């Protein structure tokens, strides 16, 4: 290939000379891919798959890194196609997370070479900042309402509310001991008990009280964590209509996508799904049949910016907007990339934001900032997130998994 010099350097300058997988646990586990070019530009991509971190680390280390060395970092699309089509084994969370890490690191490099913030490479700014929602949770309705108030006072315009279910010992998403809740708390999965009838009793009461306490200006969201059957989900969505939710998330497991037709037939509560999806193919039926309103597929788990951009453009044809997953198990590197994407994407809806632990923020210094209910991605070249490798090395990997749910009779239940 000819050596045409450009502002972004020659293809020789852009040659990938190093690719390193960094596993660290500053408050929780993260996997990061760092790519370095001959001219010394570095790019970072998040590769964290909660509870299955080392599967992605090995996929990168064993199967991707050897293919990266010598490639032109500027060939983002070709590299994506190389790893997606070329692997023969397409899709799946491990593969798509690994491809995403490469893709985001390359976008970071190319934007740095151009001297531009990443959103500028995608087509420029569409909005002042990304509307974010915070997580309020509590042991009962009153405590959850206090938490919602606390976030409103901090400037949040949108809050997700989850409340412990009376009669169940532990409800996922509810903090214990005054700490922020953490999705993966134990080395082997904690076994919890679940009862949908008990859950369906409390949730409408929670949102009724939240509207009484906080009025109609604040946007309220709720996550069902895939625990309901289609008709139960329809009943909940209908019973929440008076409280005008921004969305009901993950109402049912989404392998059976016909389920969303049942919910739609009964309710006008907006629906969001997709945090466990890995590709546009998981979303296609739901989007083109207008069965959802928000798609939650993320940059880290769905093949990076290159693939999620394709997905978002497809969703825009059906007025489906983005609402990316943003729990603590997606690293600040993913959050930075997502915020640049959110700043550009025309059909943006909202962005989830669970604050990371202080140690996490120290290991991943970042440009993004919260102001007036929105996250602002910053203006530095690339995605604006770096890693302090020395500090990262002080936090060795510590295996942790998500809890599981069983019914009260012991049957294994859905996530
Ligand atoms: O359960 O990130 O909307 N957020 C969520 C999260 C997910 C975890 C899974 O790793 O549902 O709490
Ligand atoms: Co969720």
Image (cartoon, rainbow, N blue to C red):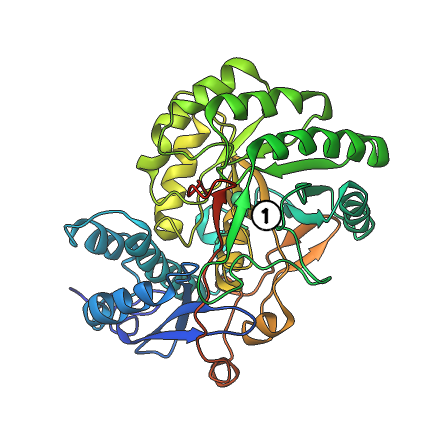
Can residue 269 be seen at all in this image of the molecule?
A: no
In the rendered structure, the answer to whether residue 111 lies left or right of residue 132 reads left
Decide which of 310, 98 is in the foreground and name it: 98
> For the point 23% across and 66% down, which residue is it?
64
Residue 85 in percent (x, y) is at: 18, 49
Residue 75 found in image quarter = bottom left
Residue 188 in percent (x, y) is at: 44, 64
Decide which of 133, 129 is in the foreground and name it: 133
Q: How many marks?
A: 1
Looking at the image, residue 138 lies above or below residue 53? above
Farthest residue in the right direction?
213
> For the point 43% across and 51% down, which residue is it?
299
Ligand 1: does it lie within 8 Å of the C-beta at label 1? yes
Looking at the image, residue 351 lies above or below residue 38? above
In the rendered structure, the answer to whether residue 128 lies left or right of residue 194 reads right
Q: Quadrant of the N terminus?
A: bottom left
Decide which of 273, 116 is in the foreground and name it: 273
In the rendered structure, the answer to whether residue 239 lies left or right of residue 338 reads right
Residue 114 found in image quarter = bottom left
Can residue 407 be seen at all in this image of the molecule?
A: yes
Secondary structure beneath disc 1? strand
Residue linked to disc 1: 352
Residue 344 in percent (x, y) is at: 52, 45
Decide which of 315, 113 is in the foreground and name it: 315
Mark 1, residues whose alpha carbon is within 10 Å: few (<14), some, or many (≥20)? many
Residue 39 in percent (x, y) is at: 34, 78
Looking at the image, residue 223 lies above or below residue 135? above
Farthest residue in the top direction?
265
In the rendered structure, the answer to whether residue 258 lies left or right of residue 75 reads right
């Amino acid at each position: 290939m000819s050596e045409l010099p450009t502002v972004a350097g020659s293809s020789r300058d852009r040659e990938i000379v190093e690719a390193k997988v960094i596993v660290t646990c500053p408050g929780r586990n993260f996997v990061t891919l760092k790519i370095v070019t001959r001219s010394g530009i570095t790019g970072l991509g998040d590769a964290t798959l909660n509870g299955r971190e080392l599967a992605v680390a090995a996929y990168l280390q064993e199967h991707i890194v050897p293919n990266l060395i010598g490639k032109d970092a500027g060939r983002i699309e070709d590299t994506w196609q190389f790893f997606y089509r070329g692997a023969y084994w397409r899709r799946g969370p491990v593969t798509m997370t690994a491809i995403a890490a490469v893709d985001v690191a390359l976008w970071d490099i190319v934007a740095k070479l151009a001297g531009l913030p990443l959103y500028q490479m995608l087509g420029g700014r569409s909005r002042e900042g990304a509307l974010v929602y915070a997580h309020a949770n509590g042991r009962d309705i009153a405590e959850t309402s206090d938490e919602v108030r606390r976030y409103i006072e901090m400037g949040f315009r949108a809050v997700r509310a989850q409340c412990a279910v009376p009669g169940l010992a532990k409800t996922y998403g509810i903090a214990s001991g005054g700490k922020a809740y953490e999705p993966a708390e134990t080395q082997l999965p904690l076994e919890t008990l679940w009862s949908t009838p008990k859950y369906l009793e409390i949730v409408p009461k929670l949102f009724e009280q939240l509207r009484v306490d906080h009025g109609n200006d604040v946007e309220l969201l709720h996550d069902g964590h895939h625990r309901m059957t289609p008709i139960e989900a329809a009943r909940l969505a209908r019973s929440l209509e008076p409280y005008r939710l921004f969305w009901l998330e993950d109402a049912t497991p989404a392998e059976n996508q016909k389920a969303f037709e049942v919910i739609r037939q009964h309710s006008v509560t907006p629906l969001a799904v997709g945090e466990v999806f890995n590709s546009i193919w998981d979303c296609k039926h739901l989007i083109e049949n207008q069965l959802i309103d928000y798609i939650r597929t993320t940059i880290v788990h769905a093949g990076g910016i290159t693939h999620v951009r394709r997905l978002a453009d497809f969703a825009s044809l059906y007025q489906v907007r983005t609402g990316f997953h943003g729990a603590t198990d997606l690293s600040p590197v993913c959050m930075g990339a997502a915020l640049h994407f959110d700043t550009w994407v025309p059909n943006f809806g909202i962005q989830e934001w669970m604050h990371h632990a202080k140690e996490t923020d120290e290991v991943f210094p970042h440009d993004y900032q919260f102001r007036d209910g929105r996250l602002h991605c910053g203006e530095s070249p690339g995605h604006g997130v770096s890693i302090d490798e020395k500090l990262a090395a002080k936090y060795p990997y510590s295996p942790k998994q998500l809890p599981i749910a069983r019914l009260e009779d012991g049957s294994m239940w859905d996530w």
